[in-house]
Amino acid sequence: MANDAIVAEKLVKRYITKKRVGLFRNLTERVDALRGVSFRVRAGEVVGLLGPNGAGKTTTIKILSTLLLPDSGHASVLGHDVVREAQSVRRVIGIMLTVEKGFYGRLTGRENLVYFGSLYGMEMGELRRRVDYLLDLVGLKELGGSDRLYEEYSLGMKARLALARALLKDPPVLLLDEPTLGLDPPSARRIRTLVRDLATRDGKTVLYTSHNMFEVEFVCDRVILINRGEVVAEGTPEELKSKLPKVRTLELHLERVPEGLADEIRSYGLEVREPMQTPEGLFVLRVLARRPEEVLDDLVRVVTSRGVEIARLKIEEPTLEDVFVYFTERGA
Ligand SMILES: Nc1ncnc2c1ncn2[C@@H]1O[C@H](COP(=O)(O)OP(=O)(O)OP(=O)(O)O)[C@@H](O)[C@H]1O
Ligand SMILES: [Mg+2]
């Protein structure tokens, strides 16, 4: 479609690696990192690429960033093919990778950004203004990091500088690989809000990865879930939750769990998990039900008839984490 900013079609990538066996022998091993990944990201959309460790997220981001060639399949960014028109792709993207390379330890954050901006051919006056604006935007100024040496940066400062570099040329498309990895909650929140604003306010297209489900719900319009190199689900968080089997969890916090209680509840045809103890010494009993509202009365009656007090009762809504677990553990 015309307004697709990112298109991936049947991307395949294999890594050939050597695995050490014994002292002197290496075995050649083939890793199927991507087994035909296809998806589309519309212009102005923020899409989260999710999946377990090793699912192929970074590999996908690297292919779209022109840092890695696919073995087969096609991908394009704003209509430019990532293999045949790599230069054009590089002009329209900002990249942030987990393992940041290329920053100079003996230069300050500001000097690093000016250096990269001049590599990109930016005019010096405009570049200095842009760098100053970005140091402020990502919060490096208030941390006192703008004019400190990069080698003295904390992890959070490095992440902020990497994001500033991705934004240097004000690119319409951002490819961010775990931009909030290892950040403290306020720093992560700042980056989250920034990414959201970049899409909502400036119309940028963002494809990004994260293992933080709360963050993904906040930032992303849509989610693409990959597992073992394949797309296993995609949609808005709400759409994905509605695809889960319609079982919800009733959580009962009890002062004690008498012998036979769980079995009695099971005799009503409900699934009951092993009770767990909270730090406060209460027992949490989880009961799975298709229509929790309908079994609530019976459940309360069974528990209280044994003289057990219910300290707390809640009906849990499915979370994005449930979606993640459901789609990535099926067939795993
Ligand atoms: N340079 C490489 N050489 C060999 N195998 C690799 C290389 N890079 C990645 N892999 C393998 O390819 C698969 C996909 O890796 P990838 O880094 O894309 O996963 P990921 O989804 O980003 O995981 P994570 O959540 O841990 O970052 C994994 O099995 C990984 O071990
Ligand atoms: Mg990764």
Image: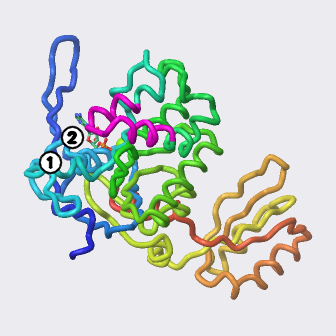
Q: Secondary structure at mark 1?
A: helix
Range drawn in magenta? 113-132
Which one is in front, 22 or 188? Answer: 188
Identify the amino acid type marked 1.
Ala
Q: Residue furthest front?
A: 125
Task: Classify residue 255 as left or right of residue 103.
Answer: right
Residue 182 within the magenta-colored segment of the rendering: no
Q: Residue at x 77, y 51 (%)?
A: 278
Residue at which label 2 appears: 67
Residue 96 in which image quadrant: top left
Q: Is residue 102 visible?
A: yes
Q: Position of residue 254 (x, y in %)?
A: 83, 62
Whether residue 277 is situated above or below residue 126 in the rendered picture:
below
Q: Residue at x 15, y 38 (%)?
A: 30
Residue 123 in which image quadrant: top left
- The answer to which of marks 1 and 2 sits earlier in the sequence is 2
Q: Secondary structure at mark 2?
A: loop
Q: Quadrant of ligand 1?
A: top left
Q: Residue at x 86, y 68 (%)?
A: 310
Which one is in front, 44 or 16? Answer: 44
Q: Residue at x 40, y 53 (%)?
A: 208
Q: Which of the labelled discs sits on residue 86, or is there none?
A: 1
Residue 107 in which image quadrant: top left
Q: How is the image coloured?
A: rainbow
